[in-house]
């Protein structure tokens, strides 16, 4: 039922919804914690491999996790 609700309301599959949430969580963690390894953050965000994390990042953010971290660091240094 949850999957059907997401499909009907959000226009995306359950898989897409979950991966978007994982990417959003990882992006937040990458921006907030510069000392932690990217792979550690990917696993904490629910990805089960580096490849799955990189593919989801490219698909939903247009960047790799490391590019996302660099952009966040650059953005915060401009403030």
Image (tube, rainbow, N blue to C red):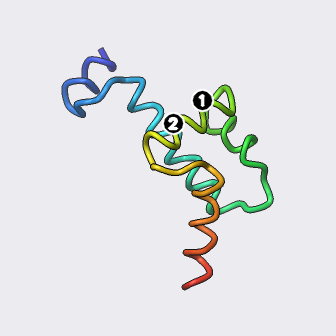
Disc number at residue 52? 1
Residue at the extreme top: 1
Q: Residue at x 73, y 41 (%)?
A: 39
Residue 17 is situated, as x and y percent measured from the top left of the image, at 39, 32
Instruction: Give the CA distance from mark 2 to mark 1.
Output: 6 Å
Residue at the extreme left: 8
Position of 61 relative to 79 (above/below): above
Q: Residue at x 60, y 36 (%)?
A: 53
Position of 20 relative to 30 (above/below): above
Query: Position of 2 compared to 41: left or right?
Result: left
Query: Position of 41 compared to 59: left or right?
Result: right
Do residues under tags 2 and 1 come within 8 Å of each other at their CB atoms?
Answer: yes
Query: Callout 1 environment at 10 Å: few (<14), some (14 to 19), or many (20+)?
Result: few
Q: Residue at label 2?
A: 56
Q: Quadrant of the N terminus?
A: top left
Query: Callout 2 environment at 10 Å: few (<14), some (14 to 19), or many (20+)?
Result: many
How many labels sit on residues? 2
């Amino acid at each position: 039922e949850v999957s059907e609700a997401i499909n009907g309301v959000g226009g995306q599959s359950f898989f897409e919804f979950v991966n978007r949430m994982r990417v959003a969580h990882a992006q937040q963690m990458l921006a907030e914690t510069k000392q932690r390894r990217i792979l550690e953050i990917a696993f904490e965000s629910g990805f089960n491999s580096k490849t799955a994390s990189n593919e989801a990042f490219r698909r939903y953010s247009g960047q790799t996790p490391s590019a996302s971290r660099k952009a966040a660091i650059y953005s915060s240094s401009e403030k």
